[in-house]
Amino acid sequence: MDEIVRYQKKIDSSSRGLFITNEGNFMYGSASLSYYNIKEKKVENDVFYSVNGIPLGDVAQSMTIHNGIAYIVVNNSNVIFGIDPNTCELKGMITGLISPRYIHFVSDTKAYVTDLYEFAITVINPKTFAITKKIDVKVPGINQHPTEQMVQYKNFLFINCWSYDNKILVLDTNTDKVVDEITVPIQPTSLAIDKYNKIWTVTDGGYEGSPYGHEAPSLLRIDAETRKIEKKFTFEFGDWPSEVCLNGARDTLYFINKSVWRLNVKANEFPKKPFIPFKKTKFYGLTVDPVTSEVYLADAIDYVQKGVVYRYTASGKEVDRFKVGIIPGAFCFK
């Protein structure tokens, strides 16, 4: 209890902050949660452990706040923790998962959880932290589809299938059935939907020698209404684009491809220079402040030592940097 009271004094619930999920080393159970006070430029590390007295687990994949609860998806520990975002006190757990990746909320009583290995989407009730059903998305006789990130248009949920796959699934949230799929280049890594209802994804193209194939990576724009690919930018072999995200107005796209790139969602030409140049390190995670359009960039360094997060203004000037946990990968604004 002393730890909870002490930490409650460090988070000002009236001010904005940023959570950073640190994956930790695979199979070492070294995942952790960091919290950054945006106004004061102060970071507090290991906040989940310091409050609850238990480790976060193995590979913290993503985090989302909904209806006053922050949900932390811990991939290799097969669990989702629900915490109070103002105190980090544990409020509940979702278990019975195989390899959870991301969570998307449809209502206060319904959310979807994607999975890397189960080839099913889990439906949960956030109020009870209980699993209500599982939606089979496996192709008969083939180990597909592993599901990843999700964006919603009307009552349709678009879900990218990354590992050894080339599909974006379309799920009807009214019926919980997959009603369509969009074929894209090899291994779409992330999703975002802009203000014009255009879905953006980058594909990494696989790797040399992959049994699924190897091709040049790409950036795609897909119309959510027609589900057709409207635009494609092709990269070079050896590039590894990832982390597609948007600003608060959803009119400007950002992603990592060694450097950080930025372009208007209506642009017809790719920018000639990066927004934030490559620093001979490992840019691993990316987010954009929906209020200020400031950019936060996670640096995994060597995947062993504690990582660093850089903070940039909307024009690309570095204004802060701070150490976090091992392999910082995802962000969640409070």
Image: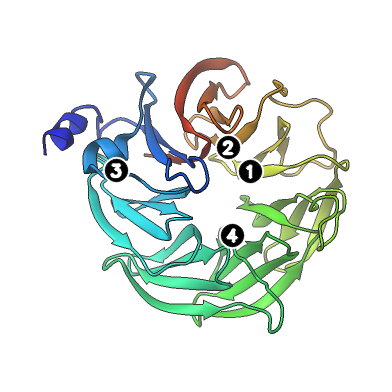
Q: Are marks 2 and 4 in contact (CB under 8 Å)?
A: no
Q: Residue at x 68, y 60 (%)?
A: 163
Q: Quadrant of residue 120?
A: bottom right
* Dot label at residue 5: none
Q: CA distance from mark 4 to mark 1?
A: 12 Å
- List the single residue furthest toward the left: 1
Pointer 4: what residue? 148
Element under disc 3:
loop
Please report whichever mark, 2 or 1, sits nearer to the chain's N-terminal start.
1
Instruction: Identify residue type, mark 2.
Output: Gly
| Residue 172: % across, % down | 56, 76
Q: CA distance from mark 3 to mark 1?
A: 24 Å
Please report whichever mark, 3 or 1, sits nearer to the chain's N-terminal start.
3
**For this rendering, which residue is in front, 139 or 326?**
326
Instruction: Identify residue type, mark 1.
Output: Glu
Please report whichever mark, 4 or 1, sits nearer to the chain's N-terminal start.
4
Q: Residues within 10 Å of mark 2 (few under 14, many from 20)?
A: many
Q: Residues within 10 Å of mark 4 (few under 14, many from 20)?
A: many
Pointer 1: what residue? 243
Name the quarter where the N terminus is drawn: top left
| Residue 152: % across, % down | 55, 63
- List the single residue furthest toward the front: 28
Element under disc 4:
loop
* Dot label at residue 85: 3
Q: CA distance from mark 3 to mark 2?
A: 21 Å
Nearer to us: label 3 or label 4: 4
Q: Are marks 2 and 1 in contact (CB under 8 Å)?
A: yes
Instruction: Identify residue type, mark 4.
Output: Glu
